[in-house]
Image (spheres, grey):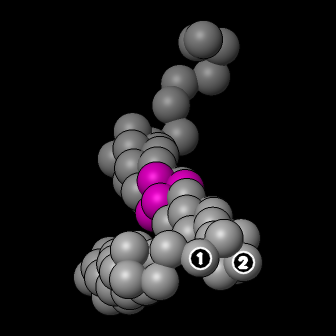
């Protein structure tokens, strides 16, 4: 899952630039743009995190099923 670290660092960089721009300008017309940018980056981070969790669970379940084998018939 090393590919997800690069996306996270890019998202953190974008948020840091947005916050620094907000602190330097502090104008209300740019506040809406920066807020929407931060929300967009947050949604990307949530989607990447959910994908990473889903892939990890899928690998765990498939590995467990492979190790367990077909099982015995008639057993729950």
Q: CA distance from mark 2 to mark 1?
A: 6 Å
Picture residue at 53% right of the left edge, 40% below the top: 70
Q: Residues within 10 Å of mark 2 (few under 14, many from 20)?
A: few
Above or below, comparing residue 62 to residue 27 in the picture: above
Query: What span is in magenta?
Result: 49-53
Residue 69: % across, % down: 44, 43
Label 1 Cα crowd, 10 Å radius (few <14 / some 14-19 / many 20+):
few
Q: Does 47 lie within the magenta span? A: no
> 34 or 52: nearer the eye?
34
- Compare residues 19 and 53 and report the one nearer the observer: 19
Q: Pinpoint residue 13: horizontal percent, then vertical percent.
A: 34, 85
Instruction: Identify which residue is drawn at 47% across, 83% down.
Output: 25
Where does label 1 land, which residue?
27
Q: Is residue 62 visible?
A: no
Magenta: main secondary structure equals: helix
The answer to which image quadrant residue 5 occupies is: bottom left
* Image disc number at residue 48: none
> What residue appears at the point 55 percent right and 63 percent down from the top-left corner?
42
Q: Which residue is mark 2?
A: 29
Camera sees residue 56: yes
User: Is 13 positioned to the left or the right of 11 in the image?
Assistant: left
Q: Are marks 2 and 1 in contact (CB under 8 Å)?
A: yes
């Amino acid at each position: 899952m090393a590919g997800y670290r690069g996306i996270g660092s890019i998202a953190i960089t974008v948020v840091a630039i947005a916050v620094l721009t907000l602190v330097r300008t502090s104008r209300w017309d740019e506040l809406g743009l920066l807020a929407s940018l931060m929300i967009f980056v947050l949604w990307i981070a949530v989607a990447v995190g959910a994908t990473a969790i889903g892939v990890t669970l899928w690998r765990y379940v498939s590995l467990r099923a492979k190790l367990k084998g077909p099982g015995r018939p008639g057993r729950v």
